[in-house]
Image (cartoon, rainbow, N blue to C red):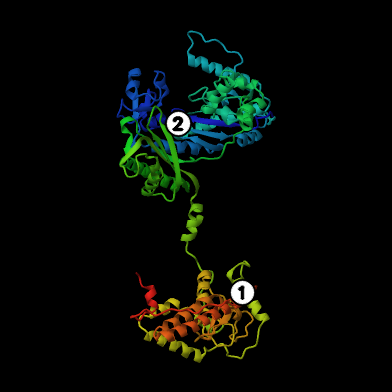
Amino acid sequence: MDYGTERVVALVDMDCFYVQVEQRINPELKDKPCVVAQYKTWKGGGIIAVSYEARAHGVTKTMWADDAKKLCPDLQVARVRESRGKADLTCYREASAEVIKVMSRFAVIERASIDEAYMDLTASVRQRLEIMADKQIEPQHLMSTFIQGYPLSTTPQDDTEDAAVHKDAERLKGLTQWLASLPPTTQTNSAELQLAVGAVIIEEMRAAVKQDTGFRCSAGISHNKVLAKLACGLNKPKRQTVLPLSSVPQLFSSLAVSKIRHLGGKLGISICETLEVNNIGELTKFTQEHLAQKFGIKTGQWLYDLCRGIEFEPVKPRQLAKSIGCSKNFPGKLSLDTKEKVQYWLQQLALELEERLIKDRDVNGRVAKLLTVGVKQAGGTTASGSSRCCALTRYEARRISTDSFAIVKSLNSAGNHQQAWSPPLTLLHLSASKFMDAATASSGGITGFLKSEIIPTQKPLSPSSVRDGLATQRTPKRPGEIMSFFQNASKRTRQQHVELPEGAAKEPNEEHVKEEEKSVHLNKKQGGQEAITSFFQKKVVKTTHVRAPDTASHVVDTFQSLTHSTTLTDKKTHTNTTDGLCAFPENSPVAETALSLASEDHIICDCCGQEVLAWEMPEHTDYHFAQDLQNSWSFSLPVSNQITGNLSKTYDAGRQCTTAQVSCSKPATSHPRSQAKMQKPAGSDVTLDFFFKRS
């Protein structure tokens, strides 16, 4: 098999599709010159589709309906339905979906537009050849098929012979010659034999479309998309054309560069101007190196193959449109020159887009994630167009219109404070794209993660299970979890474990409790000081002066909020547990919390004798300093200064103690600090509240 002939590709194009849809809706329009027009505010509206009967009278697209009637007085005009002030193409889209559904039964489909689709017939052809055995393809299997380049010699048409009859006779003659040149069906690797089988499949597909939908279509069959599209337009309507690779040189010798797919724009113009050519076949005289030098390596290689009829763009399976959009033109005096007009029409387009997107989601189970807003601005002799994109968060017209206006308002040179819009807009376009599966979209993404309900992985422990010391051990899945922090601390505790007397950590120190109650009582007696105490007050673990494993309730609460469950690792209630995770008695203040911290994480405060977490010791020392400073202001100035000086020493000592016990790499170093000398303002009894009052 020759290079570039490995595939069988077809393009199917509906014949004047909009007209056929209108004729199916209104059968009286069949076999009559007919056009489909949009609106009728000016000269009967613009024509967007023309039947072949009307084309015979010289009617073409882009004409005004009133002008077309002058060429064809019997012309029938069908109007496009309107919704929200613009054309509604719903009936045409639904008819297109019917056609695609039928076509998908025969091969892989790539939808190109509302009335076009590519088909990769390679696999279907090979399957058909396997079951054909020694059967030959006969002309009656290809009743509407033309072979490009055949017949090898044409017969001149007689003056009395009808043109259609002569054309069909030439078709049959060429088809017969080509079929006779094909090898037996047993030679399945023959490129032209595969084209013949592909043509048979397309004949069957077109007949099925006509029977199921009532629509007629044309087709082109060749080895790639470019040749298939060219072949499709050679013998329309209601016919199909096979374009063998051997017939490409003859066709390309007189085919304009602009007629080739992808060469109808700037690239095609650049090729013609740079190489001084008009026809695509003229490119064959240039070497691949020369084309690469002029247009780049990739484009040069593509052009070198293309001018010889070779192209490899795949047919991508896609039965659904890649984007869903709607637009409206505002020519001349209808241009949008105020913010109010722009917002109004964005809302109308958003309503249509919302309706279509919801329907697409319900039918096809997909959702779009990208919103594109396109505009054209009036000004000068040419219109300039631009587009902006943003995320499409939900199918809601109000949100769509608001987001659309937000991303295009920067194009308004009149400024945000003005109601005018300059330059005026002559086109608005909204489209949604980047589709993904609806189920995936609803469950994926950071938004779905944050909104989803967190389900605990373990049921809460009942009081009875805690009381009985029943617990289940949970092994951490990753060594980096929070549990590993406490397990490492537990290991260090076991290495330095000292036997403690039984019951040493069961009851809080009575002496310490009395001191704390006295401190609280003193705070209550001083007016306006409750807020200060609460400002510095911290959650502290109440325990004896003997170091023993204990629990910090606020750390446990934080840990519980992260894990949503408490893990117990020991059924024993005595203090020399080997895990650092234990159950507690029923009357314990931490009965609902079964997580203990290692004793080395605590520091005994020199002021109150409490055990405080190492990382909370600096703030705890600040609390004592502020509390004593506040009390000192109730006495005379000399006494206050003396107390303040003592407190300053105590504060420095607490800071140094904390640094020495928290830091493992550097020894604690004391730094001398001068005594605080704060004088009491004359004539007032100032407390610490004074510094927190608003000015």
Q: Which mark is residue 421?
A: none
Q: Residues within 10 Å of mark 2 (few under 14, many from 20)?
A: many
- First in residue order: circle 2 vs circle 1: 2
Q: Is residue 82 visible?
A: no
Residue at figure coordinates x 47%, y 57% from the top left: 447
- When asked about the image quadrant of residue 142, the answer is top right
**Quadrant occupied by the C terminus:** bottom left
The image position of residue 496, as x and y in percent, is 67, 82
Disc marking residue 663: 1
Q: Judge left or right: residue 286 versus residue 457.
A: right
Which type of secondary structure does the marked residue at label 2 adopt? loop
Q: Are marks 2 and 1 in contact (CB under 8 Å)?
A: no
Q: Is residue 217 left or right of residue 487?
A: left
Task: Please give the residue where the numbered disc 2 appears in the rendered image.
Answer: 215
Q: Position of residue 329 (x, y in %)?
A: 37, 34
In the rendered view, would you say 225 is above or below 416?
A: above
Query: What's the CA distance linking mark 2 and mark 1?
Result: 85 Å
Whether 203 is drawn above or below 513: the answer is: above
| Residue 155, image x, y percentages | 56, 11
Which amino acid type is shown beneath numbered disc 1? Ser
Q: Image height check: is 174 above or below 223?
A: above
Foreground residue among 548 and 592: 548
Q: Residue at x 58, y 32 (%)?
A: 9
Badge 1: residue crowd in 10 Å (few <14, some 14–19, many ≥20): few
Residue 206 in the image: state x and y as whole percent.
51, 31
Q: Quadrant of the N terminus?
A: top right
Amino acid type, mark 2: Phe
Q: Secondary structure at mark 1?
A: loop
